[in-house]
Amino acid sequence: MIKDLKNICNSKVFEEVFTNYVKDVKRFMLFKTKDIDLTEDIVQDAFVKLWDECKNVKFETVKNYLFTIANNLFLNIIKHNKVIDKHQKGYVHENSNETPEFIFLENEFYDKLQNAIASLTEKQREVFLLSRIEKKKYKEIAVQLNISVKAVEKRMHTALVNLREKIDFF
C-alpha cells in the first residue's frame, strides 16, 4: 500500500502521510502550546515544510521529520515571543549608563504616574491626555470637547494639582 510508493513527493503518498500523522502531531503540539489556534498554525506549517522538502525526506523517517519540524517551529515562536516580551518591558541593554537604582526609581515613578492619572476624574483625565499625550492646544481641546477654553484651563489646572498631590516627585 503506502510502503510500495515511498516517494513522499507523490501527492497520494503525501496525502496518506498527512492522514496517518496529522492527529499525532496535533496532540504533540497542543500539549506543548496549550493553544488550539497556534497548534493548527504549527501543524499546517510543518506539513507545508514537509512538502517543500519532500525530495530530501526518506519515507522511513517522515514521522520523526514531522515531529522535529513542528517542535522547531514551536521553539522559534517561543524565542520570538521572548524577544518581544523583553522589548515591551523596557529592556535596558547591559551596557547602559543607567544604574539599577535609576531604573528602579524610573519604574516606580512611572507606576505612580499611571495610578495618579487613573485616579483623575474622567473630564480631568480627558483634558490632561489630550494636552500632554496628544499635544493638542487648549483651543483644539475646547473645540473637540465642545466646551470653552476657560473650562479646559480649569480642568487642566485641577488635574495638575491632583497629580502633584499624588506624586511626590513634582
Image (spheres, rainbow, N blue to C red):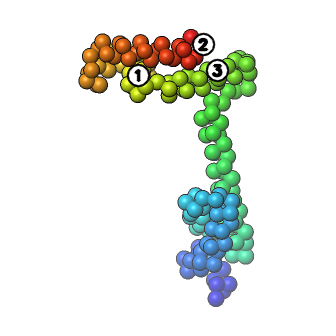
Mark toward the start of the polypeptide (3 vs 1): 3
Tell me if residue 18 can be seen: yes
Horizontal and vertical percent for residue 168?
60, 13
Label 1 and label 2: CA atoms lie apart by 20 Å
Q: Secondary structure at mark 2?
A: loop
Horizontal and vertical percent for residue 169?
60, 13
Q: Which residue is mark 3?
A: 106
Residue 124's tag is: 1
Q: Residue at x 69, y 22 (%)?
A: 104
**Amino acid found under the numbered disc labelled 1:** Gln
Q: Which residue is mark 2?
A: 169
Q: Residue at x 50, y 26 (%)?
A: 119
In the foreground, 119 or 70 = 119
Quarter occupied by residue 80? top right
Describe residue 15's horizontal placement relative to residue 131 as left or right: right
**Amino acid found under the numbered disc labelled 3:** Glu
Label 3 environment density (alpha carbons within 10 Å; few <14, some 14–19, many ≥20):
few
Label 3 and label 1: CA atoms lie apart by 24 Å
In the foreground, 9 or 103 = 103
Q: Quadrant of the C terminus?
A: top right
**Amino acid found under the numbered disc labelled 2:** Phe
Mark toward the start of the polypeptide (3 vs 2): 3
Label 1 environment density (alpha carbons within 10 Å; few <14, some 14–19, many ≥20):
many
